[in-house]
Image (cartoon, grey):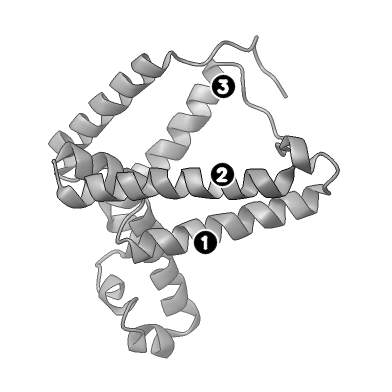
Amino acid sequence: MELRTQRDFWHPLAAGAALGLALLLTFLITGHGLGASGFFTALTAAASNALAPAWAAANAYLKPYLGAAGGPLAGWITWEVAGVALGALAGSLAAGRFRFTVEMTYDMRSAHVGVRLLRALAGGVLVGFGARLARGCTSGLGLSGGATLAVAGFLFLAGFFAAGFAISFVLGRIAR
């Protein structure tokens, strides 16, 4: 469902400058950097507390997230994630690129849509798990950590890119 004529993507330098300004504004307004994985952890804690309060209270990982007054909606990160979703929607509408579709890579053209969605879900769960193990997502560790000149941010970015190259090399070999 295209609403307007599709426009080109932003120039990478303009997009990078806009992202840098957004990061700066986030630091100035909230006192925090960018990040999203904490929202999903808070949401998981709230859902666990609603479904199995005794289990959630006994879970050492989720317990610190249960004490927040107002639940996940009270956290700044919830409003950041909502803003990102709304901004992505507004940007895709403005660029004429909004449509409901399931993207297929060259090697998955014959795969059923359900298989593609299951693979995407599995990949998202693994990335989310890895983000929590790393104590933050790519935006939290890479962007915000790098912006504050944290050594952990730069180490994460180096590892992130090295792992990406290694995995793409291995999957490229498998796909051929």
Disc marking residue 126? 1
Q: In front: 176, or 105?
A: 176
Mark sitting earlier along the chain (2/1): 1
Disc marking residue 168? 2
Type of the residue with mark 3: Leu
Q: What is the x, y in percent for residue 93? A: 56, 22
Mark sitting earlier along the chain (3/2): 3
Can you see residue 33? no
Task: Determine which residue is flagged by label 3.
Answer: 93
Q: What is the x, y in percent for residue 162? A: 41, 46
Mark sitting earlier along the chain (1/3): 3
Q: Secondary structure at mark 3?
A: helix
Q: Give the class, few, some or many, for how many residues have Cα within 10 Å of label 1's Cα (few <14, many ≥20).
A: few
- Quarter-of-image position of residue 6: top right
Q: What is the x, y in percent for residue 16? A: 33, 23
Front position among marks 2 and 1 = 2
Type of the residue with mark 2: Ser
Q: CA distance from mark 1 to mark 3?
A: 30 Å
